[in-house]
Amino acid sequence: MKKILIGACLISLAGCANSPDAYFANAVPGCKTATTTVNNQPITTRFCIRAIAFQPSQYRVSVNDQAVFTGTDYQRVAFEKTVKEGSVSGGCNELVIIQESRTQKPLPLKELPADLVAGCRITADASGNSQAFSKDAACDKVFYTGLLPMLGQVVPVEVARQCTVKLGQQTAFEERFNF
């Protein structure tokens, strides 16, 4: 019987791992953990992202060892779940910079469509070049239509993910994952 169990463990790494996050042990950009106090209770949030080339990134989020989200970023990462500590919500926004295709330098802000700049709240550095911005739900509404006429000349590049988890109205986790 022991030999069968050991054989099954060798075949199924996920089923015999020491931790549900074992799949993310060597993940890039990795796992981050934060502990805070909510309603006089310690809350430990673990947020893991595993980027895979040419595929959606994989996510695992837990609050006090209770899974609250497991999935991909095929669609926007956003979740709501009730756990024993209360209502948990959260998600991630991409941090994007728009670069010139041939130079790979940030595009001057004045060359971007005004509706894209306003809808995505894109700002400029001291030299007038566009800076990284949060591609949130409001930005999504203008992002693709604003960039469509410029594709080929510019390329949007994801530089990071800004992820947040709230328990009720209180932020329990807020971290940036650099890509």
Image (cartoon, grey):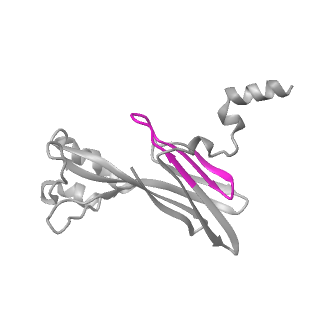
Q: Main secondary structure of the magenta part?
A: strand
Residue reaching furthest right? Answer: 1
Q: Position of residue 52 (x, y in %)?
A: 44, 37
Image-based side of 154 in relation to 21, left or right: left
Q: Was residue 153 drawn as part of the magenta stretch in this picture?
A: no
> Which of these two is toward me, 5 or 162?
5
Image-based side of 87 in relation to 126, left or right: right
> Which of these two is toward me, 115 or 35?
35
Count of marks, rendered view: 0
Instruction: Give the extent of the magenta segment.
Output: 47-70
Q: Residue at x 46, y 41 (%)?
A: 57
Above or below residue 99? Residue 165 is below
Q: Was residue 51 drawn as part of the magenta stretch in this picture?
A: yes
Image-based side of 157 in relation to 56, left or right: left
Residue reaching furthest bottom? Answer: 40
Q: Position of residue 154 (x, y in %)?
A: 18, 45
> Which of these two is toward me, 111 or 131?
131
Above or below residue 166? Residue 65 is above
Q: Position of residue 103 (x, y in %)?
A: 14, 46
Q: In which quadrant of the rendered image does the N terminus lie?
A: top right
Q: Residue at x 54, y 50 (%)?
A: 48
Q: Position of residue 95 (x, y in %)?
A: 35, 55
